[in-house]
Structures are given as C-alpha cells and as structure tokens.
Amino acid sequence: MTVFPLQTPLLPDIIALHGKWRASDPALICEDRLVTWQAFAENQNRVAHGLLALGLKKGDRVAVVMSNSIEMVEILFGIFRAGCVAVPLNLAVSDDHIVRMIKDCGARALIVTADQASRFAALPHDLAPLRLCAGEVNENWIDYATWKENQPSDPPDIPLAPDDPINIIYSSGTTGTPKGIVHTQQGRLNFAQAISLALHYSGKIRTLVNIGLYSNISWVSMICTLLNGGTLIIQKKFDALDFLTAVQELRITHCSMVPVQFQQILELKGQEKFDLSSLRAVMSCGSPLHASLKEKLCARLSGSLIELYGLTEGISTTIEPEDGLLRPASVGKPNLSVDLKIIGPDGREMPPGEKGEIVGRSSFLMSGYFNRKDATEEATWTDEAGKKWLRTGDLGHLDEEGFLYLTGRLKDMILSGGQNIYPEDLETVLMQHDAISEAAVIGIKSRRWGETPLALVVLHKGKPVPAEDIREWCNARLGRQQKISMLKIVNHLPRNPNGKILKNILREKYGNITCD
C-alpha cells in the first residue's frame, strides 16, 4: 500500500512553490522593473482567474502578439495556469499571416502589447473576440493592467493534467499557414528538465533573453530559468553593445542566441574589453555554427559555449565545450530522454558514417500538428517494433561514438548527375575564406547535370574580392563532384527572426537560372 502517493507538479505548480520559498528573490527583470517570485506567482494566478472570468475554458486557445516584456511572461504562465493554450505569434511576419494563424488555431482571445495593437484594427470581431492590451489602449481593448489587478491572487480551482495541451508554436514558414506544433503540460516540463541538465541551469542563475519570446529559442531560456527558480532578465531587442554591457554589469550566467548574433558581437569594435567571465553556459542554436566562428567564440567565451541542435517539435542534442573543441563539426549527442536514428531513402536504419535523414523520439515530443493529421503522419517514421519517430527533414550522420553531424536539409539537397551534393559541406568551405561573412548554397538547373550548386555570399566590409576568384578558391578545396558552377556576391541573405537563412526565398529569386 502506498502511504505517500507520488506528486507530479507541473510548471504552474512549480512557479507557485518558488513563490512560496523564494518569495523575495527576483524572478523577472526588464530595464528598471523587477518582479519578485511572490509577485510573479500571484500574477500568474491573477491572469488565470481573469481569463476564466472572461468565459474561457480549459483547452481554449489564446493568441499572444507581444513585444518582449514582463507582461508577456506573466501572461504566458497565466494561460498555462488556467489550463488554456498559449499561442505566441511571430512579430516579424505580415499582418495577413498573423490573421491566418489566429484563424487556424481558433483563438478565443487575443492579448497584445500596445505597439502591436494597430495591426488588428480591421480584424473581424468573430476572430478572437476577447481582446486585451498591455500598455496605452483605446476603447476597443480591455486594459491589461486594470483587468489583472482586479483578479484574486490565490490559485484558481482548475485541475491540470499532464496530457493537457499547453501551447501551440507555429513553425517558421514564410508561405501559406505554418504548422502549429502542440506541446503538453508534461512535455514542456520534461523539456525544461532535459535542457536544464544539458545547459547547467540552477537556482542562482541570471539568464539574459533578447530574442522574441514567441520563439522556442527564448523559451529555452525562459522555461529553464523559471523551472530552477533563477532570474530571467528580459531585453526588448538584441543589440551587441547592450548584450555585452548587460553581461558585464548584471553578471549574466546564461543566454540562448543564434550564430548571426554572435558574429555581430565579435565584429563590434572594442568587444574584447568587456568582462564576460560570469557566463557559465552560452547556447548557440537555430542554425549551425561554422567552424571559424565556433573557434573564435570558444576562445572569447572561455569554455562556456554549448551548441544545441533541435526542433521545436521536440528533439535535441548538445555538445559540451570540451567535445566541441575536438569535434568542431559535430552538434553532440542526444539530451536526456532523446533517442536518434539515421534512416536511408528506403526507411532502413543507416550504420555509423552513412548519411541519411535524422529521426528522433523524446519525452517532450509534440503531440502533433494542430488540426493537421496529414502533416503529423507525413512527419512520422515507424520502426520495426511499431514505435513512432519524428522525421526531422534534416540530413546527417553519426560517428562510431554516437556524435551527430549535420549535413543540411533533405529538401535542400542537390541532385547533380545522379550524385547527392549537401549544401552544408560547400558552405563550410566557403566560410573558411577570409573575405566571406555569410554564405548559402542552393541548387539551380543544369543542362548537363540536372542540378548544380549556386553559391551566394556576403563579404566582410572592406574586403572586395572578385566572385570568380572566390569560386576558384573554393572549388580547389572541394571534391570533383561538388564543384560550384556559379557564385554571386550579394548584400545580404534573407533570414527568419531566429537567424536561419531562408533558402526558399533564395530559390524563388535565383531558381530560374540555368547553367550549361
């Protein structure tokens, strides 16, 4: 007979416990504002009560279109506590695109910051009819601050279950309506626990977040910090000088950023004068770190750099600093509860050293794509034992010791003369050229080979080099079947808010080129 049944506190429960035992410790800081753990836990409850008082029920979706702020964190966790589903939307997409996502998820409520409210002036009233605004508002919006303060601070009587959906995060698609990725209460807790271990989080950390809080990259920082009872320091946007200043003055221990941000930091004049010794774990993710940038970062960050490969859908790997120095091209090994395989075109598992599609499973895998059974089935691989694995669409291979190496995206692979060419291999060589700041390789039509590589590069300022000289330099270092047929110098490469190069836009622009 069990005398003490096991308790399974979920994220909102853990916030409440921190509010009790870390009451006066700082939970959230943004500019000159500070919220203690007690106040944060109470505000989580107030938001939950307020949503329920508006008539929302468990499972109802709440669209969140907000700039980085204390209010956004309170609102997200209040949504969790109410048993509703948070739907944070990417601020960088068009107004029409945001409306499509609000329609797709069937949001009953919309919460915005004042700087985003004008985007919804023409939004039909039947879409997200309950609307709140944090900041200066007009009569068409409920004032968030007044609404929140009028709610009780005790926990609402809403039981939460591990399998309850907690959020829908839309993939970073740029055409049509991106797929909504659904996570559960238990899955998000498992995610926070696994990544906390991988990134050395603890109760005394001070984490800086400067990517939009709609991004899963920022959710790494947010959820892991708050799970552990640390302090989340919110910057409204990224600026290299602001980042360096904050790390030095606030003694930041953790952060999660993307390669293009690190590049801007290293290129900032005088950056070497800042004291970054407080940093314990600096996560890089979103796109691969090229070897030259990784080497410079490792030297500047004194062993605190941890590269993460992962999908919002719910798999991840990390590589520790000491392993990263020995295997600069690897993204490490699976995190807690994650399992990976490499499969070939025929769906069979590939041996070490052989390239194929990465598939994975974990305790924080999404439950599926929202209302997209077709997309969920398309992303599923079933092994011989009947277990379901997520098809990542990423290409890679494992070495004999289980370290993962990325090759690129399955849809980006170039088929030239019957041979597979992986753009990542070519981009790695291009980034070794002293004049190149950014590089992307896509396939274009070839009368002789079917497809052939086109390289698009951005040069460092003050380093003009003819395109043909760069192409010849690169081809001298590539295999016979990897040669770049054409190279163009461009002013910039299109990226999503997380810094990932948008190759679909490059294919739209350059895909009509044909080589002999």
Image (spheres, rainbow, N blue to C red):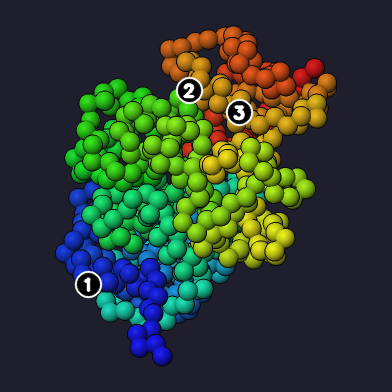
Q: Position of residue 269 (x, y in %)?
A: 30, 22
According to the image, label 1 marks what residue? 20
According to the image, label 2 marks what residue? 437
Q: Earlier in the sequence, mark 1 or mark 3?
A: 1
Which residue of the protein is positioned furthest toward the right in this rendering? 448
Q: Nearer the viewer, mark 1 or mark 3?
A: 3
Q: Position of residue 152 (x, y in %)?
A: 28, 79
* Residue 275 higher or lower than 335, as above or below: above
Q: Are marks 1 and 3 in contact (CB under 8 Å)?
A: no
Please tell me which residue is depicted at 25% across the width and 35% down the height of the picture.
276
According to the image, label 3 marks what residue? 425
The label on residue 330 is none
Q: Earlier in the sequence, mark 2 or mark 3?
A: 3
Which residue of the protein is positioned furthest toward the bottom in this rendering? 1
Q: Earlier in the sequence, mark 2 or mark 1?
A: 1
User: Which SS class for mark 3?
Assistant: helix
Task: Say few, some or many: other residues with alpha carbon within 10 Å of mark 2 (under 14 / 14 to 19 / 20 or more).
Answer: some
* Residue 511 higher or lower than 10, as above or below: above
Q: Please indicate whether residue 134 sits to the left or right of residue 373 in the image.
A: left
User: Which SS class for mark 1?
Assistant: helix
Please tell me which residue is depicted at 62% across the width and 43% down the height of the picture.
394
Q: Amino acid at mark 2?
A: Ser
Task: Say few, some or many: other residues with alpha carbon within 10 Å of mark 3 (under 14 / 14 to 19 / 20 or more).
Answer: some
Q: Label 2, label 1: how many angstroms apart (C-alpha)?
A: 49 Å
Please tell me which residue is depicted at 60% across the width and 47% down the height of the picture.
173
Q: Label 1, label 3: how many angstroms apart (C-alpha)?
A: 52 Å
Front residue of this view, candidates 318 and 504: 318
* Residue 358 higher or lower than 267, as above or below: below
